[in-house]
Image (cartoon, rainbow, N blue to C red):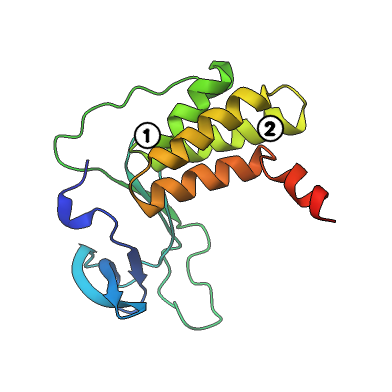
């Protein structure tokens, strides 16, 4: 994984600086405030226009680069020059990728606690697919997700549990009863 300084740091692309920054968000009274962090990925390419970032299954940061010299104008000088960057931590270990569609409902619930958010999102998508297909053991899944919610010590983990509960229709009957 990345060094601790980048954990929970929002990565921001900076078009005019031709860089990706790692900023920080911290509490300030009853709200939060952001502050500039480090230059995570400076470039020396004035045509670099990183415009979309995602975390991949390998823990890497994937950045789409439009790569054009007229970043704020209407001209497209190099229409076929886009690139994709993958940034990996030094000495990154290979991550075993589970076959998400083949694992059990309860294993999908357990993946909600995985340190790699890509696996969390893919497992949640599969839980949703099984729910709308009528192929999910909702009773067992809701019990497991309720337990995960109760045992989670951090807000992000509790949110994962709530999102998974939502896509598996954990609260559907509650809402219907109140109508």
Query: In the rendered view, does 142 fall on the left or right side of 1?
Result: right
* Quadrant in the picture for the N terminus: top left
Q: Which of 43 and 106 is in front in this view?
A: 106
- 97 horizontally vs 132: left or right: left
Seen at 45% across and 36% down, the residue is 148
Bin the neighbour count of mark 1 within 10 Å (Cα to Cα): few under 14, some 14-19, many 20 and up.
some
Q: Earlier in the sequence, mark 1 or mark 2?
A: 1
Residue for badge 1: 114
Q: Is residue 71 above or below residue 85?
A: below
Going 50% across and 19% down the picture, which residue do you hit? Answer: 99
Q: Residues within 10 Å of mark 2 (few under 14, many from 20)?
A: some
In whole angstroms, how far apart are the C-alphas of marks 1 and 2?
20 Å
Q: In this view, does 85 lie to the left or right of 75?
A: left
- Farthest residue, direction front: 178
Rendered location of residue 133, percent (x, y): 77, 28
Q: Position of residue 131 (x, y in %)?
A: 71, 31
Q: Are marks 1 and 2 in contact (CB under 8 Å)?
A: no
What x and y, as percent, mark residue 73?
50, 83
**Mark 1 falls on what kind of element?**
loop
Q: Which element is circle 2 on?
A: helix
Q: Which of 104 and 42 is in front in this view?
A: 104
Image-quadrant location for residue 41: bottom left
Residue bearing mark 2: 129
Q: Which numbered tag is attached to residue 174?
A: none
Task: Give the residue drawn at x 21%, y 29%.
Answer: 93
Going 39% across and 35% down the picture, which residue do you hit? 113
């Amino acid at each position: 994984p990345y060094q601790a300084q980048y954990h929970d740091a929002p990565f921001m692309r900076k078009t005019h600086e031709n860089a990706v920054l790692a900023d920080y968000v911290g509490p300030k009274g009853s709200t939060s405030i952001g502050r500039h962090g480090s230059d995570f990925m400076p470039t020396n390419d004035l045509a670099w226009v990183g415009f979309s970032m995602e975390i991949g299954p390998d823990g890497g940061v994937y950045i789409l680069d439009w790569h054009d010299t007229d970043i704020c104008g209407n001209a497209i000088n190099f229409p076929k020059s886009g690139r994709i960057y993958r940034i990996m931590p030094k000495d990154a270990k290979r991550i075993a990728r589970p076959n998400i569609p083949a694992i059990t409902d309860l294993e999908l619930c357990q993946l909600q606690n995985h340190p790699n958010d890509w696996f969390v999102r893919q497992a949640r998508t599969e839980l949703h697919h099984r729910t709308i297909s009528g192929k999910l053991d909702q009773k067992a899944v809701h019990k497991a997700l309720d337990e995960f919610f109760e045992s989670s010590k951090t807000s992000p983990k509790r949110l994962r549990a709530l999102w998974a509960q939502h896509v598996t229709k954990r609260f559907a009957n509650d809402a219907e009863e109140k109508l």
